[in-house]
Image (cartoon, rainbow, N blue to C red):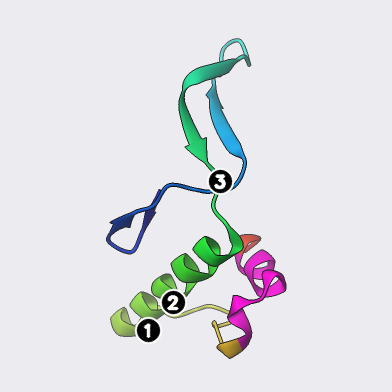
Amino acid sequence: MLIGRKAVRGAEAALHAFNPTTGTSIAEPVFGSGTASDVNQACELAHKASIRTGNCRSPCAPSSSSSSPTASRRWATR
């Protein structure tokens, strides 16, 4: 996945693409799921970018508490 300008290999559970016609899993490539830290970093970078461009419409901006798993889930579900 890309976070900011860096390619990051997800360290959580493996994700596989699937064939939309048959619904079967495709063995390769395998994608790694992002961690709570990955989600927080991506959300914070996106928020900073939206502020710089004047497009900030987020109802819950990242804060010093954004490193918590709860904050990650809140951001990930938006």
* Residue found at x 66% / y 76%: 68
Q: Nearer the viewer, residue 34 or 61?
A: 34
Residue placed under numbered mark 2 in the picture: 47
Does residue 26 lie above or below 53 as drawn? above
Residue placed under numbered mark 1 in the picture: 51
Marker disc for residue 5: none
Residue placed under numbered mark 3 in the picture: 33
Does residue 43 lie above or below 34 as drawn? below
Magenta-drawn segment:
65-75
Q: Secondary structure at mark 2?
A: helix
Q: Nearer the viewer, residue 48 or 27?
A: 27
* Residue found at x 66% / y 74%: 71
Q: Amino acid at mark 2?
A: His
* Residue found at x 56% / y 12%: 21
What secondary structure is the stretch in magenta mostly built from?
helix
Q: Are marks 3 and 2 in contact (CB under 8 Å)?
A: no
